[in-house]
Amino acid sequence: MTETTKWVLDPAHSELLFKVRHLMISNVKGEFKEFNASIDAVGDDFTNAKATATIQTASVFTNQNDRDNHLKSADFFEVEKYPEIKFESKELTKVDDENFKLTGALTIRDITKDITLDVEFGGVTKDPYGQTKAGFTFSGKVNRTDFGLKWNVALETGGVLVGEDVKINGELQFVKQ
C-alpha cells in the first residue's frame, strides 16, 4: 500500500487574489487574507492528489473599506450566514511536467458548482530550515451569479456596474508533513 503524504499551506508564502470588471472599462482587484488549504498526495507525486481549501469570507480585502463592507453584506458574501467558501478537488489532470487542470467543487453561499483551474507546478525544494516545500500557481474564472452573488446596477450608458466573470488566481506554497 502506498503511503499518503500530507502537505499543509504555508500562509506566509501564499496569496489568493481576484479581479472583476468595474463600469465595464477596468478591473478592480481584491484578495482574501485568511484561507487554508491542504493536499493529500503520494510522496512528492501530485498526479492523483486531493486538495481542499477553506476561505474566510470576512477576510475579503479590496483596499477600500466601503467596498469591503458591501462585499461582506447580504448583497454578496453575507459573511455572518456564510462564513466560508470551500473547494474540494475531484480530478487533477496532468497536461505536462509543470501544468495541470484541477477540477473541483466550489461552494459559495451554500451553492456548489464544479470549476476547472489551470495549475502550474513550481516544483519541490528544501528551505533553509530543512522543510520540504512545494509551490503552485493557479488561475481560473467563475461567474459570480452562478453562486448567488447577483447584486448589480445598470448603467445609463448600457452595461452594468460590476462584471459577472471573476478571475481568480493564487500563489500557494505547501509544507510537507
Image: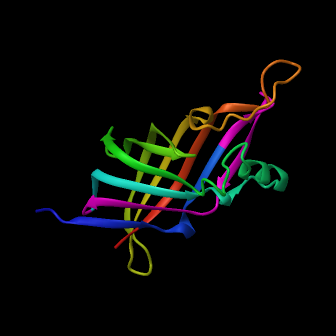
Instruction: Give the farthest residue toward the right.
Output: 156
- Find residue 69 and report its horizontal and vertical position in percent: 78, 54
Query: Would you say 56 lies left or right of 5 here?
Result: right
In the rendered view, tell whether residue 25 sits above or below residue 110: above
Q: Quadrant of the N terminus?
A: bottom left
What residue appears at the point 32 percent right and 42 percent down from the top-left corner?
Answer: 91
- Residue 133 image point, x, y percent: 40, 67
- Colour setup of the view: rainbow
Q: Quadrant of the C terminus?
A: bottom left
In this image, 142 relative to 38: left or right? right
When the figure is inspected, residue 38 is found, relative to residue 103, above or below; the finding is below
74 vs 89, nearest the viewer: 74
Magenta region includes residue 176: no
Q: Nearer the viewer, residue 89 or 111?
A: 111
Residue 124, image x and y in percent? 36, 62
User: Which residue: 84% across, 52% down?
Assistant: 66
Determine the main secondary structure of the stretch shown in magenta: strand
Q: How many marks?
A: 0
List x then y, in percent, for residue 100. 37, 42
Q: Residue at x 56, y 36 (%)?
A: 142
| Front residue (pair 48, 120) | 48
Q: What residue lies at 75% left-to-right and 52% top-to-bottom? A: 62
Reply yes or no: does residue 30 show up in magenta: yes
Looking at the rendering, the stretch of residues picked out in magenta corresponds to 19-43
